[in-house]
Image (cartoon, helix red, strand yellow):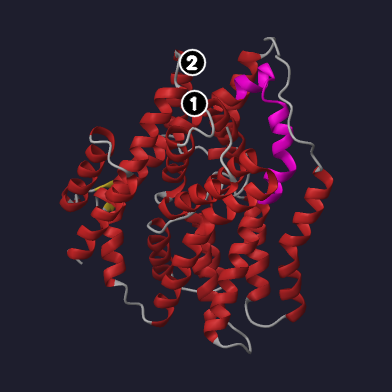
Amino acid sequence: MNPSFPQALAAFARIGLLSFGGPAGQIATMHRVLVDEKRWLDEPRFLHALNFCMLLPGPEAQQLATYAGWLLHGVKGGLAAGILFVLPGFLVMLGLAALYAGFSDLTYVQGLFLGIKPAVLAVVVQAGLRIGGRALKDNFAKTVAAASFLALFALDLPFPLVVLGAGLVGWWRGRGGETPTAVVAARSNTGRAVLLWLVLWLAPVGLALLWGQGAFAAIGLFFAKLAVVTFGGAYAALSYVAQQAVENYGWLSAGEMLDGLGLAETTPGPLVLVNQYVGFIAGFRHPGPLDPWLGGVLGAGLTVWVTFVPSFLWIFALAPHVERLRGHAALSAALSAITAAVVGVIFNLSLWFALHVLFARFDGAWPRPDSVQPLSLALAVFALVALVRLKWGMAPVLALCGLVGVGLA
């Protein structure tokens, strides 16, 4: 039975507040709340939505939240879920970017994040174990997951290629199977949805171009283009954003870009909110005739708008068709293979995250053994035991680890 709208709002607000750790941690949080705790979505429905969102450009975790909200309460549910997923992180990042631009002294904030990072690592590992245990039901799925992990970690293949390859293999394996009666979905108005969200998405960019002052037109055009060509989530876009923002536009320095990434990795919400930090700094330093603080807020707001509005376009235009095809045999086999590949993706992200949390220095891509950080290791072990063995809730584990970090700052 679907929850009431206020119940759904409360759940998605909680998800937004607890969505630390990049896409893997955020998907884990949604799975824990929507599937394990509330039981509003069953496992196949959740994984079907996840598989579709992994194929889209842009932030897949926010798209998954929007899809889940749409399943529960239609368009208003999708809007509420998608907005609440981003809003807490947006407000936190806005405050941190303003502090950074004005003062550059975030000692206690950095201490908080130092404690939270190991706890997030434990959340991500737990997600991999949970989803893997349910998705890898046969040797074929386990092989796809292992191959996907090796393709990403060892061969450094592009994320979209890995997911597409898994889907094609699954489709080929499932072709010729019986196709049950298709699931009946809500009536789709695809053309109307596309037109509406295109206008909403690009209208602020058009206004910035007409005004022509400050860095706002460049901010809008750059991040709007990035939103539709970036597959694989924020990790796939970070190097390009850093290069363009530092070398081409000159909005900030390389060191400032790294500081922004550190803030985004440890705040709630999508990791792509690092773009918001870049937009704030660009608007703050190039405000045209505006006050720098107002320029920073407008730059951040414009960046977030053009980054996340396309996600609503994809979901509201395409999700009804995806739901109608949920019973298609070959498509179901393809999406099941993508699910297995996603398990490999989550473990690849878990390993990447673990290396950067537990070690301070690297020789190329590999950590230096003598740079292990004992506090981070101890907190990660504690958090994993608390979550997996003691069955503690995520919020108290994150809060406790964060307080330890603040105490040692």
Q: Nearer the viewer, residue 2 or 284?
A: 2
Q: Residues within 10 Å of mark 2 (few under 14, many from 20)?
A: some
Quarter of the view holding residue 172: top right
In-image side of 383 versus 26 (left or right): left
Q: Is residue 45 above or below residue 309?
A: above
The residue segment tinted magenta is 312-334
The disc labelled 1 sits on which kind of residue?
A: Ala
In-image side of 19 versus 310 (left or right): left
Main SS class of the magenta portion in the image:
helix
Whether residue 360 is visible: no
- Say which label, 2 or 1, has the lower sequence index: 2
Per the image, is 324 magenta?
yes
Q: Which residue is mark 2?
A: 140
Q: Is residue 183 above or below residue 63?
A: above
Q: How many marks?
A: 2
Q: Position of residue 132 (x, y in %)?
A: 41, 27
What residue is shown at x 47% (from left), y 55% (from top)? 269
Q: Which residue is mark 1?
A: 340
